[in-house]
Amino acid sequence: MLTLIANIKTLVQVRDEAISRVSGHQMKYLPQIENAYLILEGDRIHSYGPMSALPMLQINETIDASGRIVLPTWVDSHTHLVFAASREQEFVDRINGLSYAEIAAKGGGILNSAAKLATAPEELLYEQAVGRLEHLIQLGTGAIEIKSGYGLSTESELKMLRVIRRLKEDYPHIPIKSSFLAAHAFPMVYKENHQAYIDKIITEMLPLVAGEGLADYMDVFCEQGFFSVTETEQLLEAGLKHGLKPKIHANQLHRSGGVQVGVKYNAVSVDHLESMGEEEIEALRGSNTIPTLLPGAAFFLGMHYQPARMLIDADLPVCLASDFNPGTCPSGNMNTLLTIACTQLRMTPEEAVNAQTLNGAAAMELEQEMGSISVGKRASLIITRPVPSLAYLPYAFGENLIERVIV
């Protein structure tokens, strides 16, 4: 079955070559075709080009995209989509002057979410996650990574990961990757005995997670007050023995060494990166590790933003992801993220779109499937409402400019 999307005002992110990511100054280049067509064959991209070159084919369905932009769906490579309850009281606590660390120290933050998740039935967690996922698809997200990390016990971590596995099974048209993040925080009972909890992750949780095939990646929150570089290395080595590739929460609050340890273990990505210096830049140069920025969290926490321009000027392939979670970024809206990237990180609209599509796909190892308009890739598309230009998408923040999502 062939579907024709005709009269497209601008077809964005067209890539003839097998480009897996874009770096540095290349991120300003976003290939486009004006007055274009796009033909889909089943769930794949069949062909595209200017309307003047539209081939004579037997078309089964035609979609008129006059005045509209068509681009790949957003790829969100860092979320905590599965959680039991919101944490708006901590939002108020921050307004009243408490810091992230102070909230965590009194049992808030990750420990708060872990306590609520422990008592939540698996079926309820699944139903809540389905609602969130379907909403994000409507907002243009076509692939998503989801982490555990609000379990912090064997039973609860497995419960979270089984919910994610069920989402994978029930939504095969949305590529979903799973990250095992038991090393998100230390439970209170292990506050004075970190090694005992690390041993529990390594000897008890990991064999079960790997045995059931519940995770694609091993993630660790490498940060002062959480997991040290030495502890992170211990965990990553154990994960690799079970076939779990590393991803790292790095440098959110301090220059923690998380970037360097991520590069050392060939992490797929190092995420957050509010606190960066030349040492971190040098570590990333020449590596395959993708620096992933989560400015939605910095926005919501009122923190300083990630130095996107420094990373781009260093010829690195910047990725943007939402960090959707109940405590520090209760939004997975990648359209809002596009605006934050432009206004606060000083990224151009073209750089931001590249970061949320092609580079996002690379940060999930989906570059052969997602992230660009390329023959053979998934027909995973955003069709906007009539808009004057690509720059209008981040400019008109708060507006719903998506008319249709095809996945």
Image (spheres, helix red, strand yellow):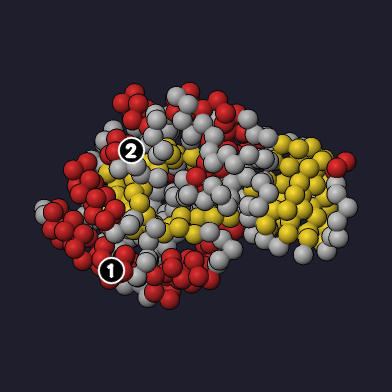
Tell me which residue sits at (53%, 71%) in the image: 170
Tag 2: Cα neighbours inside 10 Å, few (<14), some, or many (≥20)? many
For the N terminus, the image quarter is bottom right
For the C terminus, the image quarter is bottom right
Instruction: Work out whether residue 231 or residue 213 is closer to the camera in this orientation and state it.
Output: 213
Tell me which residue sits at (29%, 59%) in the image: 242
For the question of whether residue 242 can be seen, the reply is: yes
Q: Amino acid at mark 1?
A: Leu
- In the image, taking residue 106 as reference, residue 217 lies left or right, namely right
For the question of whether residue 334 can be seen, the reply is: no
Q: Position of residue 47 (x, y in %)?
A: 75, 49
- In the image, taking residue 376 as reference, residue 333 lies left or right, namely left
Q: Quadrant of residue 257?
A: top left
First-in-chain label (2 vs 1): 1
Q: Amino acid at mark 2?
A: Val
Q: Position of residue 379 (x, y in %)?
A: 67, 55
Q: Position of residue 293 (x, y in %)?
A: 44, 39
Q: Which residue is mark 1?
A: 208
Q: Are marks 2 and 1 in contact (CB under 8 Å)?
A: no
Tell me which residue sits at (67%, 57%) in the image: 44
Query: In the picture shown, does residue 315 fall above or below 86?
Result: above
Q: Quadrant of residue 29?
A: top right
- In the image, taking residue 200 as reference, residue 21 lies left or right, namely right
Q: Which residue is mark 2?
A: 263
Q: Position of residue 400 (x, y in %)?
A: 67, 50
Q: Disc 1 on helix, strand or loop?
A: helix
Tell me which residue sits at (53%, 62%) in the image: 133
> Mark 2 to mark 1: distance in Å?
27 Å
Looking at the image, which residue sits at the far left? 192
Instruction: Work out whether residue 1 or residue 350 is closer to the camera in this orientation and state it.
Output: 1
Tag 1: Cα neighbours inside 10 Å, few (<14), some, or many (≥20)? some
Q: Disc 2 on helix, strand or loop?
A: helix
